[in-house]
Amino acid sequence: MRAALMDPERVWDTAVALGDLGGKMLHACSHMSISRNTVQGGQKINMIPDAVHIDVDIRTLPGQDTDYVRAELKAAIGDLADQVDIEVLSDRSASRSPQDTPMWGVIESAVKAADPTARVHPGLIVGGTDARYYRPHGATVYGAGIFSPSIDMADFGSRFHGNNERIDLESLRLVTDFWGRIVRGFDETNQP
């Protein structure tokens, strides 16, 4: 599997093979994504608008900066690129936190307490988090949680920003215990 994920020619086939949620997550993590979310133009149904405004949500990968995004947009727009004004509303590049920190060790310990066979791995999140505001100021930020093994990833993933963001009682117990262990872990190691 790892070899397939490292080979750009095989990522799409691997995403399809993973099925619904796993494939969607892998696909979103493999490239910059652009979502056209609002389009505004014109005043009347029988008139061609003199201008159209399109707002897009762009999620970059680490290493893809504003210049990269502009070049990709211009390539996608093609021959009309000279007639389009691109205005950057928010410029927050993808970021990451290192693994060689006391916090990572405390998270690993808290995960092992819940499941001794579990392993903690870094991952790429395709959504936005508040980490983008804290990391530029030197903060180490991780997203972590433990959820019930009775909930598969497809069901879990369907709950984000859906019409039912419920969480089951077992997951609530597991994640509450997990965060309690993290707080106690920092207290025990006298970490700030």
Image (cartoon, rainbow, N blue to C red):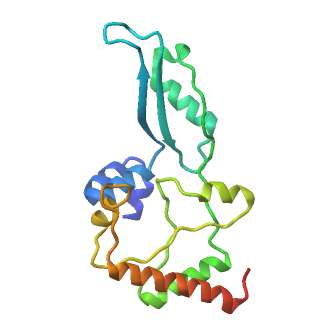
- Residue 66 at x, y percent in the picture: 62, 37
- Residue depicted at 72% across the width and 83% down the height: 191
Report whether 35 appears left or right of 82.
Answer: left
Determine whether 90 is above or below 129 in the image. above
**Which percent across, then down, holds residue 188?**
67, 92
Residue sitting at 66 percent across and 67 percent down? 140
Q: How many marks?
A: 0
> In x, y percent, where is residue 72?
52, 31
Check the image and report above or below for 113 versus 146: below
Residue at the image point whose x is 47% and y is 35% from the top: 56
Instruction: Classify residue 107 by image quadrant.
Output: bottom right
The answer to whether residue 122 is above or below residue 81 is below
User: Which quadrant of the view contains residue 105?
Assistant: bottom right
Quarter of the image for the N terminus: give it. bottom left
Residue 91 x %, y %: 63, 41
Residue 111: tell me if it is visible: no
Whether residue 30 is visible = yes
Residue lying furthest top in this view?
47
Q: Is residue 172 left or right of residue 109?
A: left
The one of 81 and 87 positioned closer to us in this rendering: 87
Q: Quadrant of the C terminus?
A: bottom right
Residue extending furthest toward the front: 44
Q: Say whether residue 49 is left or right of residue 73.
A: left
* Between 8 and 122, the one nearer to me in the picture: 122
